[in-house]
Image: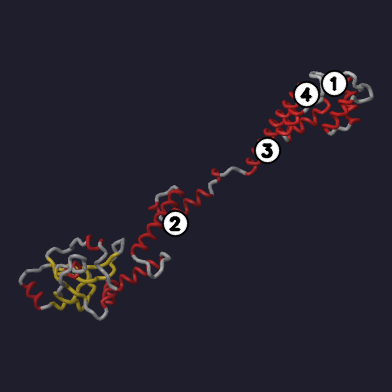
Amino acid sequence: MAAIIERSLARAGATEIVIDYDHQSVFAAVPGVGGTAPAAGWIARLEARDDGIWAQVRWTEAASARIRAGEYRYLSPVYTHDAAGHVGVVLNAGLTNTPNLDLAGVVTAGVLFTDTDTEATMKTIAAKLGLGDTAGEADILAAIAAMQADLKALADAGGVAVQSGATAIAAAIKAKAADPSRFVPVDQVVAVQSQLKALQDQIAAQSATSAVEAAMAAGKVAPATKDWAVSYAKQDPAGFKAFVDAAPVIVAPGAKTAAVPPGATGGGDQLSAEEIAVCKQMGLDQATYLKTRKQEAV
């Protein structure tokens, strides 16, 4: 109570705290309402006692007469407070017969207090939010709304309620990030990649072998060049297909050696003209080709 008194008197400064009739000084500030707010008295001193804050009042003659006549019976203070209900300062009071007036509509309109203290408070809030000195109420409310949205997103990511508070939300996100069940060990990833590579190589080898065997069955690839043809087909399937499509029949289908056309030389220790042409076309060494042919002919 002593702190409330100190803050209230500091705010009033050299001016005494006014007591009006029916809170007219509050409603006079409401746009569209207006009116006058004559003083019924002035609070000259505040005192903290065991049962609350007492005021020493200097009443006007008119107010004294109305009080003695029973026209007014109650005193209703106007004060600020935070969200937790802690009283800030006593702003004024009103003579009334309906104390504890519901002033929610006036407060919501934002016109209850428009003094320099309120302006200073708004500037302080704007600075805390990283806004400039020219930021108005709309700017402050927009910044707060954005912060609330960010906090909600973080709370959702952490799987906790936004009402849990920033500390609990941060702890929940940190716990999730440290959860080992959310990650795959590196050795398992490497193993899977190795298995996938082996499977891809196996499929490529099978596909290449099938393509080469088909080309050999068509007589377009000599058996002696199978290994080369398989390697080519694995590295460049499209290129091998183009090669086979354009290649002539150089081996009789089902035969193990190159076909020797009628009248052509060849056989024994010599290559036929067609065999020589095949070696040149495929870049094969003629001596190696001849050696392979002799081995397959046995």
Disc 1 crowd rating (10 Å Cα; few below 14, some 14-19, many 20+) is some
Q: Is residue 186 above or below residue 52?
A: above
* Mark count: 4
Where is residue 24 drawn, in percent x and y? 16, 69
Residue shown at 41% from the left, 68% from the top: 132
Mark 1 and mark 3 lie on one chain; the one further toward the N terminus is 3
Circle nearer the N terminus (4, 2):
2
Residue at x-position 80% and y-position 31%: 228
Query: Whole-Å distance between the Cαs marked 1 and 4?
Result: 13 Å
Residue carrying label 2 = 167
Q: Give the left or right position of residue 163, taking residue 34 as reference.
A: right
Residue where numbered disc 1 is placed: 259
Q: Which residue is mark 4?
A: 216
- The type of residue carrying mark 3 is Ser
Kindly report which numbered mark, 4 or 3, lies closer to the viewer in this rendering.
4
- First in sequence, mark 1 or 4: give its number: 4
Q: CA distance from mark 1 to mark 3?
A: 44 Å
